[in-house]
Image (cartoon, rainbow, N blue to C red):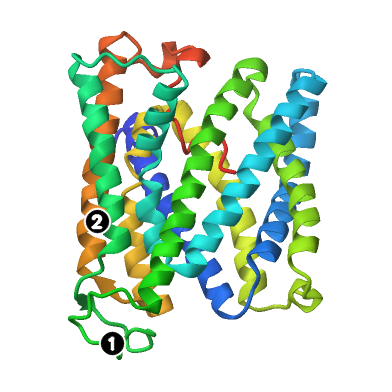
Amino acid sequence: MDRTYCYKDLLPFVILVVNECMTTGVNTLFKAATLQGMSKYVFVTYSYTFATIFFFPVYFFYRRSRVVPQLSFNILFKIAILAVIGYSGQVLGYAGISYSSPTLYSAIANLLPAFTFILAVICRMEKLAIKRRTTQAKIWGSIISISGAFIVTFYKGKSIVIAHNSPSFHMQLSNDILTSVDTNWAIGALFLTVSKILFTIWFIVQAEIMKEIQDALTSVFFHNLFASILALGVGLVAETNRSLWKITLDISLISTVCTAIFGKFLGSAIYAWAIHLKGPVYVTLFKPLSIVIAVVMGILFLGDTLHVGSIIGATIISIGFYTVMWGKATEEKEDGFGSKESQPIENVPLLQDYQTVKS
């Protein structure tokens, strides 16, 4: 087999699939930890702190090996604002998982391109040429994605796969009326949606910062540092039960360490490498795969119940996702930005969501 093919095609494919498994896996671990009583504030604080500790030696040697741009107060202030947005999105996201499941998180996460497109139009960062088929694709894709989100949130339908240890096992299969469990599901969806809107803002602010410093690792390190300080301050105020801050060698410690290593540290490196090699559009094409992974992990490890509504909604969201991404990719190609090697930083698409950094 040709080495070039292995490195440029096969290896990115395999690693990105593994990375989606890791990302969904850490969300599943978090859900398992919350079922054991772990606080989301404690979880976010420790995961950011561990990530900063893991990043520090990498950033230290990185600074020694190359010229790193000087950071002005203005840049540091913008990164601090970025940390506030990222931290808020993280807390709301984990709150959403606590109320619902990692499967719903994965489904709602695919609304990011639609939210980004809408916000970019509102902020006049994206031109809205209605007559262009690419613009029409992005508009219809956004509408389809949001419609799918409503379905996955407010319609469960009959159970397809029932886990015997699921809290809803004893419910009637035909019960489509909102119960307390369904209400929690809707609340979780609301938290997750607001979380993804915040991350949409986060991506746009991050893109603006990268225009000024063009150094992803520096931005990642200081973002995690500021977020750690913020998380500790908010966590100590919000979580008054001091016993919850004691992490023992159980699922709580495993989930926080795995999130720091695989979700924030290794995941960031993989996205940066893959985007450099294949471009942002290729990387985002793997995101709907996380829905399938989350369903399987939820059934196997959390005892989740799979409903018809989740499948229908996730499918519609995925269709909308790919429609938006097709419109963006085609637009770049038609405008002459198809080659990622020649694409200047200011033209990197705002849909480059899961790239160099994950807050």
Element class at badge 1: loop
Marker count (numbered): 2
Element class at badge 2: helix
Q: Nearer the viewer, residue 69 or 291?
A: 291
Q: Which mark is residue 67?
A: none
Quadrant in which residue 146 is drawn: top left
Which residue shows up at 33% across the image and 68% down it? 296
Question: x, y percentage for residue 241?
Answer: 77, 75
Amino acid type of the residue tagged 2 in the rendering: Gly
Please indicate, yes or no, whether residue 18 appears anywhere in the rendered image: yes
Question: x, y percentage for residue 314?
Answer: 26, 55
190 vs 70, left or right, is left
List the single residue furthest toward the top.
336
Quadrant in which residue 347 is drawn: top left
Please indicate, yes or no, whether residue 356 appears anywhere in the rendered image: no
The C terminus sits in image quarter: top right
Q: Counting residues from the N terminus, which is met first, the one under dot 2 or under dot 1?
A: 1
Amino acid type of the residue tagged 1 in the rendering: Met
The N terminus sits in image quarter: top left
List the residue tagged with mark 2.
313
Number of residues whose C-alpha sits closer than 10 Å to that of mark 1, classed few (under 14), some (14–19) or many (20 or more): few
Which residue shows up at 80% across the image and 35% down it? 60
Query: What distance separates the C-alpha of mark 2 from that of mark 1?
Result: 21 Å
Question: x, y percentage for residue 194?
Answer: 49, 48
Q: Nearer the viewer, residue 19 or 4?
A: 19
Contact (Cβ within 8 Å) of mark 2 with mark 1:
no
List the residue tagged with mark 1.
171
Which residue shows up at 25% across the image and 11% down it? 334
* 291 lies above or below 86: below
